[in-house]
């Protein structure tokens, strides 16, 4: 993965591309995507695939929670945290 | 005697007024409160102008208000039309226009998104909005749901209707055209509820978790069986398996009905990590249960009965496999539900022998009244019973499902495929022409044809074959994005293939079987 790829940018792009309600409601990085119905359960699985394929993040079923997927910002934070843990840097 | 849907609620409220009826998050209502609430809303609907047989749409997420709305409309003498909240405004407008909807119960936020789409639905006279709505002067009359709940109710209540009358219209897709409204009478719904309660042995001790939408016949039946038996229904809107698992545990759920995507989500989402001693039974409908998922479920739920079922909206509920047969026949749909019969017929209308593939034809108390406002489409599906002695005349209509099945020597049924081009994905029926029409709306496509490709989890996914309008290269990603804007996600093609020409039959129509053969199907 390129050093300077920011997960937030890619996740934001993907959400706007795949989930029409995101564009219609002009959601921000902090808006709730789940309660509002912008993303459903199958949509979450597509985001998981994105994370696994483009960021090489391992997503376990204990990671599939509103805390990690509720907003674009939280998803980016989850990716960053997972990568830090996986690389063993612990920072 | 109980002969209208809301009589089931009335009866349960009389027998167990203080028993928990509905749970949604932290909201808990007892039967007495639900019955009183429905009576007040029913009075409000009649005062607002609902006449006998008027269609009232319900476009609400799982909620106490959604449950109250369904039974209130029934009590008011109207016909409820539950609308799935994943549908986009144009689809809601189609339903409203098609059934001549008089009123719609929804939220202010949802109404705002549908304002322009519903603008030219001339039959719509008023809205009932939940929450504290702002009055929207000038467009249509708006009533507040909360205000209606405060209305005192005249006793005794004068019912309008008999069991033969229409209770609900559930919209579902066919193999062509736009969704059609399947008409269910009070008798249909009550028969379905009684029959399902019988073979699932549902009692008032049941705590049912409703994860399927009430716009789907199997989802609606969770509510009907609960209120019929005086059980408790727990409502949930979920995204993650964890949310379902938490509800199963915290609410000590005894019963869960799902479609294959729900079971896949749970099987891959940690169901093996917990024990569910209270879960008495689970059911599957809306598509075949993937065998790998079934294996995980049996391991995770060793003391839970598993019922594999099949049904079609046009015949409400159709077959079930007794759990004790699961070991011997894990891929079977089972046999006819009580008081109903399944005929497997060949092209000549004769019964098929065991092992011979024929069309599943459903006969009995759950056969619907047909499609609203569409006698031609109804006549394609509801036809006279070809096996009746001629002396009985045409007194009975049976339902031709369009599903091809075969029976084994013991009379158990197995799904083979569709007779026509209809696609089934994530439990939804999808008409290819609906998807193709949206593809044409891009303005870049001269010909389009979509087919279903088998998918382990979703049942089928959609593949679109497209031909460019002027020979220019087609941007499939752009076309897919266009679809994502216009349709719910289960209708968006997953794969595209650009062709220079679509294969045609001798009569010039698209040759769908040829396209399927291309894919090895």
Image (tube, coloured by chain):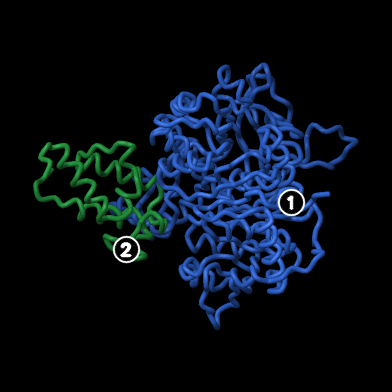
Chain colours: A green, B blue
* Residue drawn at the location 68% of the way across and 69% of the way down: B45
Query: To which quarter of the image does residue B393 belong?
Result: top right
| Circle number at residue A27 | 2
Going by the image, does B7 lie left or right of A26?
right
Residue B518 visible in the snapshot:
no
Q: Position of residue B43 (x, y in %)?
A: 72, 69
Is residue B351 depicted above or below A17 in this figure?
Answer: above
Q: Position of residue B488 (x, y in %)?
A: 45, 53
In front: B154, or B447?
B154
Q: Secondary structure at mark 2?
A: loop
Chain identifier of the residue bearing label 1 in the image: B
* Residue drawn at the location 44% of the way across and 34% of the way down: B454
Q: Secondary structure at mark 1?
A: strand
**Which residue ends up furthest to the front in the rendered image?**
B18
Is residue B48 depicted above or below B199 in this figure?
Answer: below
In front: B450, or B251?
B251
- Classify mark 1: residues with Cα within 10 Å, few (<14), some (14-19) or many (20+): many
Q: CA distance from mark 1 to mark 2?
A: 43 Å
Going by the image, does B354 lie left or right of B444?
right
In front: B273, or B259?
B273
- Classify mark 2: residues with Cα within 10 Å, few (<14), some (14-19) or many (20+): some
Q: Position of residue B494 (x, y in %)?
A: 37, 44
Q: Position of residue B391 (x, y in %)?
A: 90, 36
In front: B394, or B291?
B291
Chain identifier of the residue bearing label 2 in the image: A
* Residue drawn at the location 56% of the way across and 53% of the way down: B177
| Circle number at residue B4 | none
Residue B141 visible in the snapshot:
yes
Label 1: which residue? B185
**Which residue ends up furthest to the right in the rendered image?**
B391
């Amino acid at each position: 993965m390129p050093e300077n790829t920011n997960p937030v940018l890619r996740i934001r792009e993907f959400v706007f591309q795949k989930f029409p309600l995101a564009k219609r409601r002009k959601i921000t990085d902090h808006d709730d995507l789940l309660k509002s119905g912008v993303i459903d359960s199958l949509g979450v699985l597509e985001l998981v695939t994105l994370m696994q394929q483009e960021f090489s993040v391992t997503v376990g079923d204990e990671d599939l929670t509103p805390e990690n997927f509720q907003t674009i910002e939280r998803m980016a934070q989850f990716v960053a945290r997972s990568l830090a843990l996986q690389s063993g840097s612990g920072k | 005697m109980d002969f209208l849907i809301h009589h089931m609620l009335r009866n349960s409220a009389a027998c167990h007024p203080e028993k928990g009826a509905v749970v949604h998050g932290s909201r808990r209502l007892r039967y007495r409160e639900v019955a009183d609430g429905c009576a007040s809303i029913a009075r409000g609907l009649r005062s607002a102008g609902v006449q006998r047989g008027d269609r009232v749409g319900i476009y609400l997420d799982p909620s106490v208000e959604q449950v109250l709305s369904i039974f209130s409309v029934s009590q008011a003498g109207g016909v409820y039309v539950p609308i799935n909240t994943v549908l986009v405004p144009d689809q809601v407008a189609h339903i409203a226009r098609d059934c001549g909807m008089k009123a719609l119960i929804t939220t202010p936020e949802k109404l705002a998104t549908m304002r322009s789409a519903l603008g030219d639905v001339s039959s719509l006279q008023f809205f009932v909005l939940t929450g504290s709505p702002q009055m929207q002067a000038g467009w249509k009359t708006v009533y507040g749901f909360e205000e209606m709940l405060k209305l005192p109710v005249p006793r005794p209540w004068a019912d309008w209707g008999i069991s033969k009358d229409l209770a609900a219209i559930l919209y579902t897709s066919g193999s062509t055209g736009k969704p059609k409204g399947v008409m269910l009478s009070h008798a249909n719904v009550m028969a379905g509820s009684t029959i399902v309660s019988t073979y699932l042995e549902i009692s008032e001790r049941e705590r049912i978790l409703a994860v399927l939408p009430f716009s789907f016949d199997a989802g609606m039946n969770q509510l009907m069986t609960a209120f019929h038996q005086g059980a408790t229904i727990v409502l949930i809107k979920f995204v993650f398996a964890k949310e379902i698992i938490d509800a199963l545990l915290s609410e000590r759920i005894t019963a869960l009905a799902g479609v294959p995507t729900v079971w896949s989500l749970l099987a891959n989402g940690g169901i093996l990590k917990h024990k569910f001693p209270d879960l008495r039974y689970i059911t599957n409908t809306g598509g075949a249960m993937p065998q790998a998922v079934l294996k995980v479920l049996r391991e995770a739920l060793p003391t839970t009965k598993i019922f594999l079922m099949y049904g079609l909206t046009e015949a409400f509920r159709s077959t079930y496999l007794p759990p004790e047969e699961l070991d011997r026949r894990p891929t079977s749909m089972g046999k006819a539900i009580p008081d109903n019969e399944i005929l497997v017929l060949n092209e000549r209308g004769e019964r098929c022998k065991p092992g011979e593939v024929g069309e599943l034809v459903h006969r009995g108390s759950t056969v619907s009244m047909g499609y609203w406002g569409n006698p031609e489409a109804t006549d394609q599906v509801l036809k006279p019973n070809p096996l009746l002695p001629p002396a009985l005349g045409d007194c009975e209509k049976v339902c031709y499902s369009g599903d091809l099945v075969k029976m084994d020597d013991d009379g158990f049924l197995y799904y083979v495929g569709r007779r026509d081009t209809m696609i089934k994905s994530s439990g939804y029926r999808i008409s290819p022409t609906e998807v193709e029409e949206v593809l044409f709306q891009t303005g870049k496509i001269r010909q389009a044809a979509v087919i279903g490709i088998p998918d382990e989890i979703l049942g089928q996914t959609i593949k679109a074959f497209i031909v460019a309008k002027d020979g220019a290269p087609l941007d499939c990603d752009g076309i897919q994005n266009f679809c994502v804007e216009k349709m719910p996600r289960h209708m968006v093609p997953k794969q595209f293939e650009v062709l220079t020409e679509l294969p045609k039959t001798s009569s010039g129509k698209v040759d769908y079987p040829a396209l399927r053969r291309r894919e090895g199907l």
